[in-house]
Image: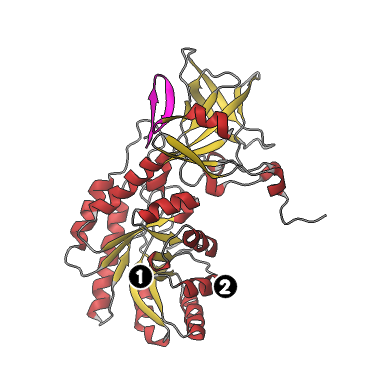
Amino acid sequence: MRLAGFDYRREALYCEEVPLAEIASRAGTPCYVYSRRGILDSFRTYHQALEGIPHRVCYAVKANSNLAVLALLERAGAGFDIVSGGELYRVLQAGGEASRVVFSGVGKTAPEIEQALEAGIHCFNCESEAELGLIDALAARRGVRARIGLRVNPDVDAATHPYISTGLRAHKFGIATAEAEAIFGRAAAFPNLTLEGVSCHIGSQLLDTAPLAQALDRLLALVERLRARGVEVRFLDLGGGVGVPYRPGERAADVAGFLAEVRQKMAGRDLFLLLEPGRSIVAEAGVLVTRVLYRKNSAAKEFVVVDAAMNDLIRPSLYEAHHEILPVRKTARGTILADVVGPVCETGDFLALDRELENVLPGDLLAVATAGAYCFVAASNYNSRPRPPEVLVEGDRWRLVRARESYADLIRGEEV
């Protein structure tokens, strides 16, 4: 586990130059807090390592789609990988350029495709011949040509959680390599498309980057076969998937070594490289701050009841995911073994089970670490709970970049 932009000073946890306790006292709890410096440092790791070869780092919007985060990355030179029309809308509202957007995903709808064509995105990563036919028809209606990257399923085992593994033949994503070659051969059947790229995404949370390197080798071999047949392939999209350590002592992915290997493999290929990292840019730069409500002891368990719940952060309940839980202020009270649970009416509402943590008391603050990715974006209003605010810290200043929802927000659009 690594904290990007967070550290302890005199036993108090800070985000950059701001104590988290100060944010909690004014913004309330639960609340998400992100470090501007942590996000930019992680993005620049990619951008600088690939300097000198034609490339674009397209941030995966699904990881954290807050407008302030998107605007921050846009100003740093990022492109964007989207999987819905709503994400495209967010990118444009944040000042992002449509020409730096890649539209991925297995189930694009006709309205979403029309929206992307009107905006003038860089390309669609397509996942079936039926999808190609739909984009071709909609592009013909507009009198434009759509740029296409064909998402290939390289049949590489990412060795990650089955819900976030996407690169095997049994998965719904991508097109088999042999089928992809045949589709490129039939490209003339789509007069309003320009098939000029190959792409893949084999899964998420990869701490071992060897499967990504294997997938790159298979894509490059496909490019060589296509070029030998006279097909003009201009870009290669390797997707994302690089993971981050969530547990103390867990080995971090060797991002620098992986990118050096990518550089070496891409050298002299005359290909524009696209990468789509998400989690590895924002996860470690965020925490969820929550306040202890009660201590409860049953015959079999010790419970720490906090004001954050599964509707605020569902990963532990959904994936059995581990997030370290840190005291916002360290004490000398020792530790306890407890379940950290929330107010939602579900036995599955927990942030940690059988966890050794600070011997906290009601009123104390806790920080759920590595919460910058796939946390707020998956939040809901279950149990009619307003979603928490989001805060961005910039040096010694902080600001709300999403206000806490109100009860009125919960019923907006409803009628009696």
Please report whichever mark, 2 or 1, sits nearer to the chain's N-terminal start: 2
Where, quadrant-wise, is the C terminus in this rendering? bottom right
Disc 1 target residue:
177
At 54% from the left and 19% from the top, the residue drawn is: 360
User: In this rendering, is residue 358 above or below 319?
Assistant: above
Other-residue count near label 2 (Cα within 10 Å), few / some / many at <14 / 14–19 / ≥20: few
Q: Please, which colouring scheme is shown?
A: secondary structure
* Stretch in magenta: 5-17
Q: Is residue 244 visible?
A: no
At 56% from the left and 28% from the top, the residue drawn is: 25
Give the image location of residue 158, x and y in percent: 37, 52
Give the image location of residue 272, x and y in percent: 27, 67
Prevailing SS of the magenta stretch: strand
At 47% from the left and 14% from the top, the residue drawn is: 334
User: In this rendering, is residue 36 above or below 324?
Assistant: below
Q: Residue furthest front?
A: 397
